[in-house]
Amino acid sequence: MISAEITLKAQFYDLDPMQVVWHGNYPRFLEEARCALLDRIGYNYPEMQQSGYLWPIVDMRLKYVRPIRFAQVVTVAATLAEYENRLRIEYRIRDAETGEVLTKATTVQLAVLAATQELCLECPPALVERVRGLLA
């Protein structure tokens, strides 16, 4: 499948009182990797809007394996796992130096027709064609 990866360094403002990255910051890290993946596909949020669809996240799951600490450099990989009926993306956050898995996550987004707010049971051709073009 199609993947993209970003590198982040944990900053002081990311930490909680226990000196580890606060759990609420992880969705932001996932969003940055998801945008890199969507850029690679050529269907990021502006293209979604232009094609007439909204893509709300309807499910997000995170498994915190090990904490991220101040100044730790991590890579966040986003991999497209499904794209025909929903957009399911799997993530792995790893220590950049050791490769140790720190977090596993998944998000699911569904296509909603912007004009009517109707939920779509299939992904629009604008996305499917781009993905298939990259997989060919």
Image (cartoon, rainbow, N blue to C red):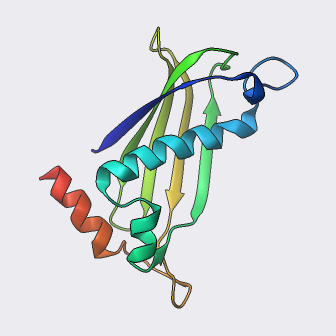
Left or right, residue 105 beside residue 25 = left
Q: Is 79 drawn above or below residue 131 in the view shown? A: above
Residue extending furthest toward the left: 136
Q: How many marks?
A: 0
Give the answer, above or below, for where 118 lies relative to 90. below
Q: Nearer the viewer, residue 34 or 67?
A: 34
The image position of residue 110, as x and y in percent, is 49, 68
Of residues 122 and 114, which is closer to you in this image?
A: 114
The reply to whether residue 81 is in sight is no
Residue visible at 62% across and 33% down in the picture:
63
Q: Position of residue 97 (x, y in %)?
A: 47, 9
Question: Which corner quadrant of the image does residue 66 belong to?
Answer: top right
Residue sitting at x 63%, y 43%: 27
Q: Residue 124's spot in the image, x, y percent? A: 34, 75
Nearer to the camera, 34 or 71 = 71
Residue found at the very far right of the displayed protein: 17
Extreme top residue here? 98
Q: Quadrant of the N terminus?
A: top left
From the viewer's perspective, is 104 left or right of 11?
left
Viewed as shown, does residue 121 lie left or right of 3?
A: right
Tell me which residue sits at (16%, 58%) in the image: 133
Choose between 106 and 73: the one closer to the eye: 73
| Residue 41 visible, this angle | yes
Q: Position of residue 122 (x, y in %)?
A: 37, 75
